[in-house]
Amino acid sequence: MINDLILTDMKTIDVEGGSVLRVLRSNSNEFKGFGEAYFSTVKYKITRGWKCHKKMTLNIVVPMGSIRFVVYDGRNSSSTFWNFQEFILSRSNYNRLTIPPGVWVGFQGVGVEDNILLNIANIPHDDNEVDHVPLEEFDYNWNI
């Protein structure tokens, strides 16, 4: 596992007529404060990335569809520097992926229906604190 990256099995509570899908609590170890929450959609076979936040911690869940996340460690001081790791998050594999600053991430829609992620970030989005590079910049096989 990449240093400081956390995959947390999340509880789904079935109730009459639906479900409750927990995401993040203020007393969770992964909670680093609240900056903003947003949903993002990604269509089947569409790949987005690479991006790396300098200050933001991401807390991502996928309540609908299925999304593949690929992360790699861009932190020079980390023992897992430049290691890749892949996760598929979905309703049936309901986990929260916590991505610390300095770790690059790309993601791809693997569900053929709607693919939606929710990110609860510790700070508001700021274009000046995130770096972007094209997918071709890093050698990773995104074939489904």
Image (cartoon, helix red, strand yellow):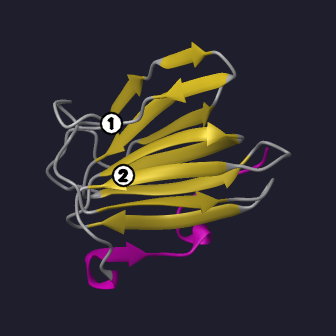
Q: In terms of depth relative to the viewer, which is nearer, 25 or 139?
A: 25
Q: Is residue 46 above or below residue 91?
A: below
Contact flag, marks 2 and 1 (Cβ < 8 Å): yes
Specify whether 121 is left or right of 110: left
Q: In terms of depth relative to the viewer, which is nearer, 104 or 124?
A: 124
Provide the residue designation for mark 1.
Answer: 24
Q: Could you say whether the residue bearing mark 1 is in a helix, strand or loop?
A: loop
Q: In terms of depth relative to the viewer, which is nearer, 20 or 69?
A: 20
Residue 105 can be seen in this image: yes
Q: Quadrant of residue 41?
A: bottom right
Q: Is residue 93 above or below residue 111?
A: above
What range is drawn magenta here?
127-144
Specify whether 128 is left or right of 92: left
Q: Position of residue 137 (x, y in %)?
A: 53, 70
Specify whether 109 is left or right of 138: right
Q: Position of residue 96 (x, y in %)?
A: 43, 34
Residue located farthest toward the right when viewing the structure as drawn = 112
